[in-house]
Image (tube, helix red, strand yellow):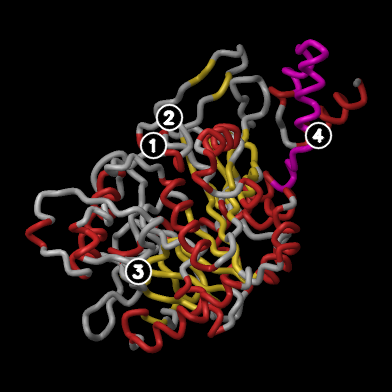
Amino acid sequence: MEELTRTAEEKLRTYNQVHLIERLQRLPENKRHKLAEQIKHIALDRLFQSLEKQELAEGTADASIKPIAYESWEQYGKGEQQAFADRGWELLRRGGVGAIVVAGGNGSRLGYDGPKGTLDIGLPSGKSLFQLQAERLLHLSRDAGRVIPWYVMTSEDNHEATKAFFHASGYFGYPAEDCFIFQQNSMPAVGHDGQLLLSADGGIKLAPSGHGDCFASLKRTGALDDMKQRGLDWLFYCNVDNALVKMADPAFIGVAAYYNRDIAAKVVEKTDGQEKIGIVCERNGRPAVLEYNEIPDEISNAQSADGHLLYHLGHISILLFKLDFIDKHADADIPYHMASKKMDHLDANDQLIVPDKPNAYKLERFIFDFFPFAELITVLKVERQEEFAPVKNKTGVDSPGSACRLVLALHRKWLIEAGVPPEKLYGRDIELSPLQSYGGEDLSAEAWEAGLNR
């Protein structure tokens, strides 16, 4: 015990964490042992080196930025589209594709107490984001004749609550053995004064380390080994907070397989230069994403000769990765990005401090920082109204309400295309189950009249 405490104190002294040394010295033995164990396993060297690198990077200009080549789904002919979809279905039928959703966030920003994936966005069915995604995968699994393995990445903040929700929901009809729920890595939060913060339980406050730690977390938890044992070739990747995401989209899989690059990314046309989504581009001759808060105005507002946005490809976190690529780069040292956040913590007198403005730095890795490891990636532009309904804000744009309206608008469009007279849909919110129709197929006016499409 004394040796463990002494080692922890030496480690803390190296990084000028005197307040934690004093805390260790006054804690009773059982609590002192618990805190010393936590300190032992935290990579403080990586944490403070990353903070230093981030501060240095903020003072340097970005490198050469250029537009990136892309494909447009709408510009393919019907025959080409069908050929791509057929190729994707081949991979699904032989069990070559798995799906992962990164779901480490909570709904606090939305005024919701719980994991974001458990949120009901206001659809008539009351289905959660998790259920919408599960049912789309179940539909594909049924048509493919085999279950698509589903991996759900949580965080320390919501892991147990997510598992409990899946269990209580009967996994939404998904086979439990084909649903792998695992927890992502964490990093300590650091106050603006450079001091590590204390959590409400008296330990060092940790925060999820970002979706960029997905590959490392897959490896650490055994999920990557599970994928290898199943013989997966590709992993479909998305965020939980997109109510319209086409899970394991066969057409997207087919395009990715045709071009056979390590990474494929779906993009949408940006609404304008200031829209708060990143852009897919080239940086230093390699594929990259610039986050919206990192894009200089001269890039975000740049126009081509015909007056259109030059950097118009919005990144929506719908990706495909070759499993070999994930395996090769799972331990890659991609950078951490520093964000200033409001974080509750205990002070030196064990009083809970609830700040009213940002007081700490959170370090996160981003999934798109793996892009430069690929010489080329496949970029596919798709229609926003069919695939992108983000849930980021409590009200207004990109809120549960706006996402709900986008889902219902798409379902209305599908019904009209199936022959239902528009006047019969006027003033009605009609939701279609993903178990019945994945992308607008298998609908008819006759079935709707008989109540089968409702």
Task: Give the distance between the C-alpha atoms of the residues marked 4 and 3, in whole angstroms.
Answer: 45 Å
**In this view of the protein, which residue sits in the foreground, 72 or 190?**
72
Residue name at image x 26 percent, y 41 percent: 395
Cα gap from disc 2 to disc 1, whole angstroms? 9 Å
Nearer the camera: disc 1 or disc 4: 1
Residue corresponding to mark 4: 40
User: Do tag 2 and tag 3 residues touch (Cβ < 8 Å)?
Assistant: no
In this rendering, position of residue 323 left or right of residue 139: right
Which residue position holds label 1?
109
132 left or right of 273? right
Q: Give the residue at the far front of this rendering.
A: 450
Proximity of marks 4 and 2: CB atoms separated by less than 8 Å: no
Residue type highlighted by circle 3: Val
- Label 1 SS: helix
In magenta, the rendered stretch is 21-46
Height in image: 373 above or below 198?
A: below
Res 113 label: 2
